[in-house]
Image (cartoon, grey):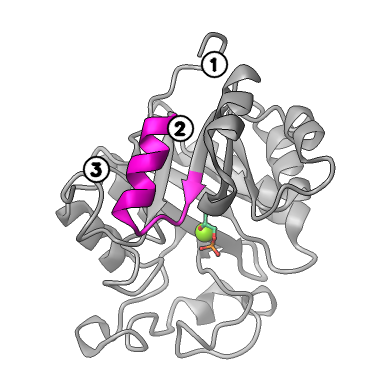
Amino acid sequence: MNGMTPWPYPLWLAHRGAGKLAPENTLAAFRLGAGFGFRAFECDVKLSRDGEAFLLHDDTLERTTSGQGSPAEQDWAGLSQLDAGAWHSPPFAAEPLPRFAQVAAFCQANGCALNIEIKPCPGEEARTGDVVAREAARLWAGALPPLLSSFKPEALAAARDAEPALPRALLLDKLWDGWFECAQDLRVVAVITNWRLMDATLIQRLHASGWRALVYTVNDEAVAERLIADGIDGIITDAVDLLGPGGK
Ligand code: G3P
Ligand code: MG
């Protein structure tokens, strides 16, 4: 464990705000997750055409909003009017897409840490990494900095170049050729993998490199217990009512 940076983030992170019990990536989801005792969250951030950073997972609006098409081709004025809650269930109807700044305010007001997944629309990797890092540095000035993560090395490289002091993590859904050297080049503090890729050997290899080891998306108690025994540093979960600070 020697050589690793101090780790100020809680073990448990609620995925997309509160997993599946509220509309993902909305403030309603953050409130619900906080109500279950979570003090750290993961969310997905991308940019509107006019450069507003906001929360959304998909590259298109249809699944989780009342809009259509690509958010990268629409301005925030229109996106801010969409319903991002009715798709989930009636109590959440009219829940808006949150701006990045609103999530920063919520997290800081409630003493919560944040893992910001930079989730660029195709072709927007560098611009999104750059804008999200600059906005994060401004919005979290003087507070516990958010952990910036991405599956897209180009986005993390832009974040590194814009705000080198903000912590970064490489997301991996498989151990592709060159991932280790890529993480070195990005000067990450952590690697976050699909939980199926993570075991004691990989955790030890990451720790020996000075990096923390995190996983997504663990919804099974036995899997969580195995990873905790192996020395995992962070677990992203949808099961906010079963696992985490308010569960097991
Ligand atoms: O940040 C980890 C996890 O959120 C990655 O998967 O598709 O839910 O964004 P996804
Ligand atoms: Mg995500």
From which residue to which does the magenta span run? Answer: 215-230
The mark closer to the camera, 3 or 1, is: 1
Q: Residues within 10 Å of mark 3 (few under 14, many from 20)?
A: few
Indicate the position of residue 212 as horizontal and vertical percent values: 53, 28
Q: Real-space Cα distance between discs 2 and 1?
A: 17 Å
Disc nearer the start of the sequence (3/2): 3
Is 217 one of the magenta-colored residues? Answer: yes
Mark 1 residue type: Met
Q: Which is more foreground, mark 2 or mark 1?
A: 1
Eye-nearest disc, 3 or 2: 2
Callout 1 environment at 10 Å: few (<14), some (14 to 19), or many (20+)? some
The answer to whether the residue labelled 3 contacts the one labelled 2, judged by CB atoms less than 8 Å apart, is no
Give me the residue at 52% from left, 32% from top.
Answer: 200
Residue 62 in percent (x, y) is at: 53, 88
Q: Which residue is mark 3?
A: 109
Q: Give the residue at mark 1.
A: 4
Q: Nearer the viewer, residue 1 or 35?
A: 1
Residue at 29% across / 61% down in the picture? 239
Q: Amino acid at mark 3?
A: Ala
Q: Which mark is residue 209?
A: none
State the image coordinates of residue 51 (x, y, percent, origin top left).
64, 62
Inter-mark Cα distance, 3 to 2 = 14 Å
The mark nearer the N terminus, 2 or 1, is 1
Residue position marked by numbered label 2 in the rendering = 145
Residue 98 can be seen in this image: yes
For the residues marked 3 and 1, what is the alpha-carbon distance in whole angstroms?
A: 29 Å
Q: Secondary structure at mark 1?
A: loop
In terms of secondary structure, where does tag 2 sit?
loop
| First in residue order: circle 3 vs circle 1 | 1
- Where disc 3 sits, the SS reads helix
